[in-house]
Amino acid sequence: MMQETMGLIISNEQIADATYRMEIKASITEAMTPGQFVNIKVKEHLLRRPISIASIEEDAFVIVYRIVGDGTRILSEMKKGEMIDLFGPLGNGYPIHEEQKDVLLLGGGIGVPPLYEVAKRYRALGKTVYVALGFDRKGSVFFEREFRKLGCQVVVATMDGSYGTKGTVLDAVEKAKIDVDFVYSCGPMAMLKAIEARYQKGYTSFEARMACGIGACMACVCKDREDGKLYHRICKEGPVFAIGKVGFA
Ligand code: FES
């Protein structure tokens, strides 16, 4: 059940260029599933920011965010011991398929974090987890070691070729000859489009398209791919949808 609550900041540290990891102690972790998000009120800013949940612990959770404006800059300056106003967990996350023997997780930039909890769940079930992470350049890379520590097979791509394979996550998958057809993805729209053109099974998170995050602004509305009259709000019915469910137009 979603609710408004106050969380206690346990840590808040920079892990890559303009990218921060914050751990928050809160009472709402029990209700969280991988791929969901929380809406965070940042001090004097009235607008809440939807930020995806990267890792769920017993009484704490982790978010990873990029500084994109004033709200996230203020968030990056908050210190251990401060309280933070949370609303969540929100949205529908990634279902876990116990019958799969292996899965491939495809994350681009700030779309990487929600896949971390998915990897944790599959590794806890003893499954083989392949992970392809895509970033702009070497300085933006994060979580490669964290996924390896879980026992995942990890490949990295950067657009400028300064680290790992030059190109996209799909280039890295091809180079490593990873032949798994059940995928979980999250990242920029161009990346998701390329993934949905190639894979038929699995899930995509469209969280990059969210604005208010609570179903009020309609900025995130998208068409169902089969029923042209049916619309979905990414923040309410999503952000995770089965591959092929939602149109890109
Ligand atoms: Fe505002 Fe979905 S982001 S309605």
Image: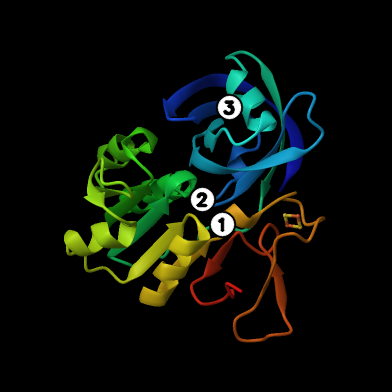
- The mark found on residue 24 in the picture is 3
Q: Can residue 99 be seen in this view?
A: no
Element marked by disc 1: loop
Mark 1 in CB contact with mark 2 (< 8 angstroms): yes
**In the shown orientation, is residue 102 left or right of residue 19?**
left
Residue type, numbered disc 1: Gly
- Name which quarter of the figure residue 225 lies in: bottom right
Element marked by disc 2: loop
Q: Nearer the viewer, residue 107 or 37?
A: 107
- Name which quarter of the figure residue 87 lies in: top right
* Other-residue count near label 2 (Cα within 10 Å), few / some / many at <14 / 14–19 / ≥20: many
Q: Which residue is drawn at 77% across and 57% down?
A: 215
Query: At which x and y percent is residue 66?
Result: 53, 35
Residue 86 to residue 222: above or below? above
Residue type, numbered disc 2: Pro
Mark 3 in CB contact with mark 2 (< 8 angstroms): no
Query: At which x and y percent is residue 55?
Result: 48, 39
